[in-house]
Image: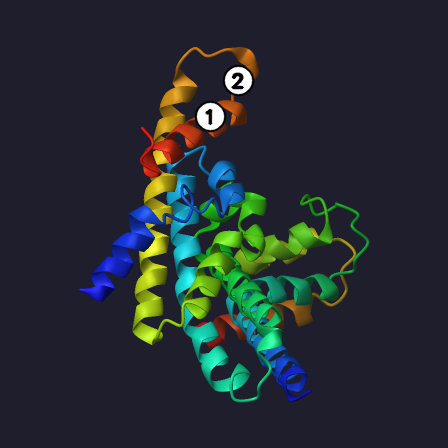
Amino acid sequence: MEMFTIFTTALIAENIILTKFLGICSFIGSSNKEKNALGMGITVTFVVLISTIFTYLINKYILIPTNSTYLQTLFFILVIACFVQITELITKKYFNNLYKSLGIYLPLITTNCAVFGIILTNINMNYDFITSIINSLGSCIGFVFVIYVFSLIREKIDKNNIINSLKGVPIALITAGIMALIFSRII
Amino acid sequence: MIGVLLFTLIAFVLSIMIVFLNHVLFKRRRKVDIIEQMLPGYNCGMCGFGSCLGMAVKLLSDYSLINNCKICKNKDEIIKYLGDDKNEKK
């Protein structure tokens, strides 16, 4: 039951994009098309899940026994950067179209704060192995869900007549704001 | 102190992992480089492919195109390299 609570909390109430406002860069940047959004979501999910496993192991078996938790940030960024590189190589080899359409946003997952945020939450809340994976999975599904819905809305908006100065990113930001209001139960 | 040493060690291991993966995934690219080095490298464009790199890419699929190159002297060597490669695949 506790697992289920953590999962739904990470998925909806503490949604990584619309409640914590992490990972906005890739959220705005790669949600212009439905396919890009799904690709970005799946890539981020892959990176987060693998880095969660590795950072948990590194934190438990290397950092805490050697009493060097002050190196946490460095270690975690190293692991994230490494797995983003590996994901990039795999995407370049097997999903070349996705690689081309995501462009700069693919290597930028390294600096995507959503990834680092999820991992730090896992460590700071002292979750055990299974719980941290459940938390990461919930956050990532939340990320994919929001970015996918947002890309559909943006595609719909682009077809309509809107004021010239609001076209593109400005209207996307306004839409994101309204979605965030819904998620924080104001509307 | 020991944390810093471990950090260096892990960074080293991870970087070797990435280099190895790059090596495995992009073998074809490396073959192109080797063939390009065997070609004269004048980029004269007489073969019709613009540059020696373009020629090397085309050679991977059809090595009879080597006769398009007017200046190349080590044609036998290149054909042998490409032929060996095809046998390996079989």
> Can residue A41 be seen?
yes
Residue A33 falls in image quadrant:
top left
Q: Residue at x 37, y 32 (%)?
A: A181
Q: Quadrant of the C terminus of chain A?
A: top left
Q: Position of residue A94 (x, y in %)?
A: 43, 56
Q: What crowding class fits label 1: few (fewer than 14 Cα within 10 Å), some (14-19), or many (20 or more)? A: few
Q: How many marks?
A: 2
Q: Residue at x 69, y 54 (%)?
A: B53
A67 vs A119, left or right, is right
B78 vs A47, left or right, is right
Q: Which residue is mark 2?
A: A166
Q: In this picture, is A164 found above or below A86?
A: above
Evaluate if marks 2 and 1 touch, with contact meaning CB atoms under 8 Å apart.
Answer: yes
Q: Position of residue A51 (x, y in %)?
A: 46, 68
Residue A18 falls in image quadrant:
top left
Residue B42 falls in image quadrant:
bottom right
Type of amino acid under label 2 = Leu
> Can residue B15 be seen?
no
Disc 2 and disc 1: Cα gap in Å? Answer: 9 Å
Q: Which residue is mark 1?
A: A174
Going from N to C along the chain, the mark reached first, 2 or 1, is 2
Viewer-side residue, A174 vs B15: A174
Q: What crowding class fits label 2: few (fewer than 14 Cα within 10 Å), some (14-19), or many (20 or more)? A: few
Viewer-side residue, A80 vs A87: A80
Type of amino acid under label 1 = Ile
Viewer-side residue, B23 vs B10: B10
Q: Position of residue B64 (x, y in %)?
A: 58, 57
